[in-house]
Amino acid sequence: MAGSSDSVMTQKQLPAAAGFYAAIAAYALWGIMPIYFHGLVGVPTLEIVAHRIIWSVFLLLGILLIRGRLGALWETLSSWRLIAPLMASALLIAANWLLYIWAVQNGNILAASLGYFLNPILNVLLGFAVLKERLSRAQWCAVALAGAGVVVLGLGALSTLWISIALAITFGLYGLIRKMAQAGPMVGLTAETLVLLPIALFGMAMWGANGQLAFGAMGAAIDGLLVSAGVITAVPLLLFAFAARRLRYATIGLIQYIGPTTQMLLGIYVYHEAPTLAHRIAFPLIWGALALYSWSALRQNRSGT
């Protein structure tokens, strides 16, 4: 009996464990994303977004074809109930991409990282208000600590706070919609990129006709980076969507601090953006919150509550 019970418990815990590792991988990849976009300095932001959409479509359709899942994609595209939320999430993620790339390329990596420091707090609140997730006392303390760190960061960067708030809202709402959407990670992301594809193709055609296209005009290295936008875009989003369906939204929110912390360190130590006193105060508060939340979640998992 004990062996059977252990087996059942292990099977129940496996999806959450897989989601946990997928979330860590997604946010680690997003954390180092500024390196990629710095390599594309000189390429217009809108064109980079268009390449992310176009090459993601090619990659995702190829994967679905190999896996025999094109039928599921067609079912999603032909059902208003399934495609309507994905149309909304597609517009949100496109706006998020556009603002994030612009921020990175214009020396605002720290402002961008603050947006993703804000986002976990928004995720926790959305999980509480919309998904009816409940937190323990220790987890609420962790949220309060993280919130204090974010407030300190915000007060130290008022002139660029609009960038941070916009990034937090667009990605927070995107994640909530993807968690609630009926489509799976691969099919859902493919549907999202297909929704955006006509806009991307129209932009590319217009820029090409006006001689403003960077692709094919800035050398093989830039072309290679733009073509690789499909992989750069799709892999972390797939990992995120996989995690979002298996973890509490509040848990995802706290794991997310891996990404903006990495971005902040890149901004300071690689791209030489000057850290402020606010960064030095907020950093230990936020990571203390992450440690407290993780400890509380581990206790809950062990006790089965």
Image (cartoon, helix red, strand yellow):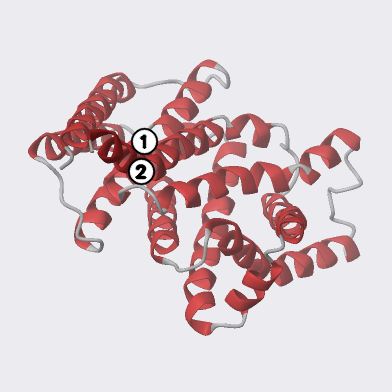
Residue plotted at (82% across, 61% down): 207
Residue 186 position within the rendered picture, expressed as x and y whole percent measured from the top left: 60, 57
Amino acid carrying label 1: it is: Ile
Residue plotted at (37% across, 43% down): 11
* Disc 1 residue crowd, few under 14, some 14–19, many 20+, Cα 10 Å: many
Q: Nearer the viewer, residue 305 or 230?
A: 305
Above/below status of 192 relative to 247: below
Residues at discs 2 and 1 in contact (Cβ within 8 Å): yes
SS class of the residue under badge 2?
Answer: helix
Numbered mark located on residue 252 in the image: 2
Image quadrant where one finds the C terminus: top left
Amino acid carrying label 2: it is: Ile
SS class of the residue under badge 1?
Answer: helix
* In this picture, residue 106 sits left or right of residue 10: right
Image quadrant where one finds the N terminus: top left
Numbered mark located on residue 255 in the image: 1
Above/below status of 288 relative to 88: above
Q: CA distance from mark 2 to mark 1?
A: 5 Å
Residue 93 position within the rendered picture, expressed as x and y whole percent measured from the top left: 53, 57
Residue 42 position within the rendered picture, expressed as x and y whole percent measured from the top left: 75, 40
